[in-house]
Image (tube, rainbow, N blue to C red):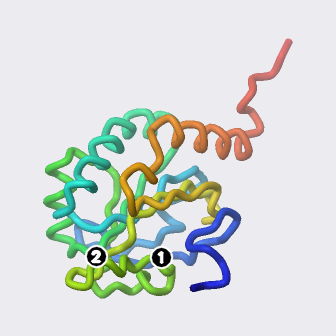
Amino acid sequence: MPDVPRLAVGRELPDLALEDHAGNPRELSALLGGDPTVLHFFRGWWCPKEQAYFRRLVALQDEAEVAYTNIVSVSVDAPAVSAAFRAGVGARWTFLCDPERTYVEALDLLEVADTVNRPYLPTVVVLRPDRTVHSSYDGYWFWGRPTLEELRQDLRAVTRELRADFDPPHA
């Protein structure tokens, strides 16, 4: 058991460097830019719980795009598999691929119950642009994953911290 809980609030994540769904090398810091980000670690395309949760995230993507917010998903799926799954669910955000499981153990996110696929433990975090965890949700059980309203509240809080003009000036 690690000294710090996996993806604890206040913890800075390493700058993940992985291929995206198109096979392009990407770094998490570049994907975040200066905006809040929902970072979603998931088991893989084959999991019905993941498919159900992706339907929620797809419902959020229009709002995220106009609110200067990113969504990034990470799995152990290869780029071609991630690209097909991404297209199939209608997602427009970046999927990062970790088939070599480079970060699974480094982040203490190996789902130990699945010894065949060795996937990521389903986890959702809301990140500040400096990769600091604002909130973290353990989704091993489906109800542990954040609702869209919980994500909206977390993203509102981070955006309020980041944007000096969040509240408009008064005359």
Badge 2: residue crowd in 10 Å (few <14, some 14–19, many ≥20):
many
Q: Can you tell which of label 2 and label 1 is closer to the viewer?
A: 2
Q: Is residue 57 left or right of residue 132?
A: left
Amino acid type, mark 1: Leu
Q: Position of residue 144 (x, y in %)?
A: 45, 53
Element at badge 1?
A: loop
Q: Which image quadrant is residue 161 in?
A: top right
Of the numbered discs 2 and 1, the one sitting upstream in the chain is 1
- Compared to residue 29, the image places residue 104 above or below, namely below
Badge 1: residue crowd in 10 Å (few <14, some 14–19, many ≥20):
some
Q: Residue visible at 36% across and 73% down? A: 120
Numbered mark located on residue 138 in the image: none
Numbered mark located on residue 76 in the image: 2
**Residue under numbered circle 1:** 16
Amino acid type, mark 2: Val
- Compared to residue 25, the image places residue 42 above or below, namely above
